[in-house]
Image: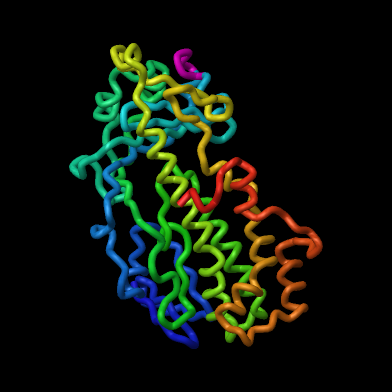
Amino acid sequence: VKYWDSNEEPAVVLRGGETLRADVVIVADGVHSPARWLLTPHARKAAEKIPSGYSVHRSAISAEKLKADSRCSHLLDGTIRTWLGPDAHACTYPLDNGNGLAFTYTHRDDGSLASLDWRDKKPIAGMLKELQGWDPVLLAALSHFPSSLHWTIVDEKPEEEWISAGGRICFVGDSVHPMMPTAFQGGSQAIEDAAAIALCLALTGGRPDGVPLALETYEALRRPRIKEAQALGKLQQDLWHQYLPPPAARRRRLSRSSDSSTNAPGPSRPSLCPLTFALYDYDVENYVLEHFETFARAIDPDFVLKTSWREDAARKANIALDVRRASWADSIEREGMKVDEVG
């Protein structure tokens, strides 16, 4: 309920009144982050977030009824599937080796339908009414979901401040850089943040006096990749939502589906392979280990990375120091995309 932002020993005050003190505090409280507007003067509260003009339904259920439904049981086969419609798309995702199914449905929203409350649950009937005329397989599957969460999608750039004024409280994940659902990167980028922070702290000696430089370097290392992941997510939605079914399909009001892993784009249909697949071949720990000193010295020219710190960090991350892997930029370029054109 309260944070003490100190350049020596920050603290968190719990609801019960207990005060926890530490050398560093990592905040991971999501897109509605109360910590952000308590700690950073320029932060917007959840109600002030910028709507993107779209909202998303999402839910997950166990698969007992789906397995017994011959119309849609094949959706549990391990394949992610995507359906495109006018300014909308839907995806299904098998879970737990086919024992569950999740879906998302993203569509235009003038702001009157969804909310920024992540607990905003709606009966599935309203969404099914919107999807009348879509693929019967999709409708059959969704009919087994009793309800869905219905969220407004915000269009937020990475926050100006990733670190508190005291230099020892740091934000990760959606609390500092929310991702659009079409980025497929929300959880992934939060995990990368955590791995990067752990290594940055180790590479400054794992000592309290190294925390401020470690966090500043973490921010400098992570911002470019976050920017690209966010840009790819927005570009992905734009590409999918520009698609209009051919006239015959529009007359039937049928949105066809394809497997993301195998579908090839046609003359009027974009590829269903997510653009952010280009981000998958990336080792955040190896990247931080290779580039930390360069970024740290740009912040503090007097910084010297001790060999023992680097060796200790590599050992903790289980990285052989002579191993060099491709950077995320190399990965994108291998996919035929130039990094400077993505943003």
Residue 54: image quadrant is top left
Residue 15: image quadrant is bottom left
Residue 281 drawn at (x, y percent)? 64, 47
- Residue 15 visible in this rendered orientation of the protein: yes
* Viewer-nearest residue: 209 or 108: 108
Q: Residue furthest left?
A: 112
Residue 231 drawn at (x, y percent)? 44, 50
**Where 88 sits versus 18, above or below?**
above
Task: Name the magenta segment's main secondary structure.
Answer: loop
Residue 69 within the magenta-colored segment of the rendering: yes
How was the colour assigned to the protein in this rendering? rainbow
Q: In this figure, what is the number of numbered marks?
A: 0
| Residue 175 appears left or right of 341 | left
Residue at left offset 75%, top offset 61%? 318
Residue 64 drawn at (x, y percent)? 48, 25
Residue 170 within the magenta-colored segment of the rendering: no
Residue 101 drawn at (x, y percent)? 48, 31
Instruction: Indicate the quadrant containing the N terminus: top left, top right, bottom left or bottom right.
Output: bottom left
Q: Which residues are magenta?
A: 68-73
